[in-house]
Amino acid sequence: MAEYDDPYARSGQFIDIMIAGWWDHFGEAVAEAVRRMPADRGPLLDAGAGGGWGTLLLARTLPGARVLALEPSPVLRAVLLSRVAASEGLRARVTVDGDDLLSARLPERLGGVLMANLVGHLSPDERDRLWRDLAARLAPDACALLTLAPPLEPERVERSRMSEVRVGERVYTGWAEAEPAGAERITWHMTYEVRQGERLVSRDEVSYDWWTLSEEGLRAETAPHGLGVLPHGPAEAGLFRVVPQG
């Protein structure tokens, strides 16, 4: 397993509960794309699986599919593995791998790929490697379903509340802001607060770089590898299907 500098070492304890709302809103749009994946031609890949929201959706939507879930963050992978291990049905057909997408030993043929909130972690050169590799592995009629999250080009994002979740007597709140960090990059500054009534229990602040990518940029990158790009679902979801051409 490749050495991994975990950007979620401190924030991973909050990520899973704070992204649940996105899956509540857009999970059906993801499932609609998953239903088209030819799972009989190869396993499904959940790349950057996090705590497993997408992994569970893949397995639930296509009950006969085998799923390979990649998550290099040890914190997030602990949640993912626990979810899979808690279900006898999932234990039989979901494999959890700790390598990142570019280091993992992938099957020669894939019936489909889910990459939610992932491509921003990859540089243009890394994405070029990814598109070349997927073009060779995607089965006919398969797709890679990914998200493009704003901002789509380097610009300042003012501080805003991204999520707030109550668990028991405590409220977990996530704040986000960003600033340009060079060509095609921004730096996200995240603050995670835990409160109980008026008392601030804890505050964690983390920063990480993120590569921006627009729909036009995605099309320009994938086309040389014989891949096309199709918007999918509501525009606010930022979902795109990358499909083999011809």
Image (spheres, rainbow, N blue to C red):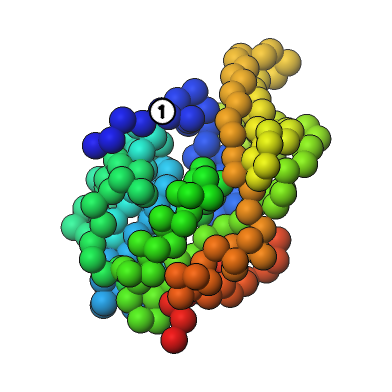
Q: Nearer the viewer, residue 75 or 197?
A: 75
> Which residue reaches farthest left?
92
Q: Position of residue 178 (x, y in %)?
A: 72, 34
> For mark 1, what is the residue?
5
Could you tell me which residue is drawn at 67 percent across and 65 percent down? 216
Q: Amino acid at mark 1?
A: Asp
- Quadrant including the C terminus: bottom left
Q: Position of residue 166 (x, y in %)?
A: 62, 33
Q: Is residue 38 visible?
A: yes
- Quadrant including the N terminus: top left
Answer above or below: position of 213 versus 58: above
**Horizontal side, residue 227 vs residue 26: left or right:** left
Q: Position of residue 36 (x, y in %)?
A: 43, 79
Could you tell me which residue is drawn at 48 percent across and 30 percent down? 8
Q: Is residue 29 visible?
A: no
Q: Nearer the viewer, residue 99 or 71?
A: 99
Q: Nearer the viewer, residue 127 or 174?
A: 127
Could you tell me which residue is drawn at 50 percent across and 70 percent down? 224
**Horizontal side, residue 58 vs residue 178: left or right:** left
Answer above or below: position of 185 versus 205: below
**Horizontal side, residue 67 vs residue 173: left or right:** left
> Which residue reaches farthest bottom?
246
**Horizontal side, residue 245 vs residue 153: left or right:** left
Could you tell me which residue is drawn at 44 percent across and 62 percent down? 131
Answer above or below: position of 101 versus 73: below
State the image quarter where residue 165 is shown: top right
Check disc 1 and report its element: helix, strand or loop. Answer: loop
Q: Position of residue 242 (x, y in %)?
A: 50, 70
Answer above or below: position of 34 versus 210: below
